Image (cartoon, rainbow, N blue to C red):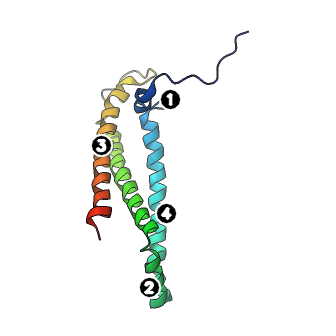
């Protein structure tokens, strides 16, 4: 009786990580897209609370605004920017893909769908490079150029 190994040693190293591993980069991009969407929603709700605190008078408004001037909230603002940059660019990539421009010619569905991966992966990589550049420049603006 042969016993199968449940865990295999990763001999691919960094190349395996870049290629996306077991699920592929598109699955990880999808998961991160969902997480950033929820993060942006959470920020939106916090923004509504902060804006509506004006109802309870100018003193409460000032206390709330003083709370948001702390460094942890400045870092949180930067994380919102990171989430927005990623979510927006990945959304544009998904929009282009849904229109069919990133899919290629229709073929018989044979798993793995190599044609779709060959066409979608470069679009994903370009979108992530642009998002990375935006995130770096946003960080420079937040921490070096901003007040």
Question: Which callout, 1 or 2, points to the residue nearer the camera?
Answer: 2
Q: Quadrant of the C terminus?
A: bottom left
Closer to the N terminus: mark 2 or mark 4?
4
Callout 4–callout 1 Cβ contact below 8 Å: no
Q: Secondary structure at mark 4?
A: helix
Check the image and report above or below for 1 versus 134: above
Callout 2–callout 3 Cβ contact below 8 Å: no
Please tell me which residue is depicted at 44% across the width and 85% down the height of the picture: 62
Callout 2–callout 4 Cβ contact below 8 Å: no
Residue identifier under label 3: 129
| C-alpha distance separating marks 2 and 4 | 22 Å
Residue identifier under label 2: 62
| C-alpha distance separating marks 4 and 3 | 26 Å
| C-alpha distance separating marks 1 and 2 | 50 Å
Q: Nearer the viewer, residue 24 or 116?
A: 24
Closer to the N terminus: mark 2 or mark 3?
2
| C-alpha distance separating marks 4 and 1 | 30 Å
Residue 130 horizontal/vertical position (percent): 28, 46
Residue identifier under label 4: 42
The outermost residue toward the front is 144
Q: Residues within 10 Å of mark 1 (few under 14, many from 20)?
A: few
Residue 52 horizontal/vertical position (percent): 46, 80
Please tell me which residue is depicted at 58% across the width and 22% down the height of the picture: 8
Q: Residues within 10 Å of mark 4 (few under 14, many from 20)?
A: few
Residue identifier under label 1: 22
Closer to the N terminus: mark 4 or mark 1?
1
């Amino acid at each position: 009786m042969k016993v199968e190994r449940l865990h295999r040693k990763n001999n691919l190293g960094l190349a395996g990580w870049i290629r996306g591993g077991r699920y592929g980069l598109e699955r990880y991009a999808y998961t991160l897209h969902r997480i950033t969407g929820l993060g942006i929603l959470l920020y939106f709700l916090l923004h509504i609370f902060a804006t509506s605190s004006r109802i309870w008078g100018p003193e409460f408004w000032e206390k709330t605004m003083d709370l948001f001037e702390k460094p942890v909230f400045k870092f949180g603002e930067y994380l919102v920017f990171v989430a927005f940059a990623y979510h927006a660019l990945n959304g544009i990539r998904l929009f282009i893909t849904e229109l069919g421009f990133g899919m290629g010619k229709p073929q018989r569905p044979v798993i793995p769908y190599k044609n779709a991966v060959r066409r979608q992966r470069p679009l994903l990589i370009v979108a992530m490079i642009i998002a990375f550049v935006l995130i770096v420049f946003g960080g420079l603006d937040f921490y070096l150029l901003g007040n």
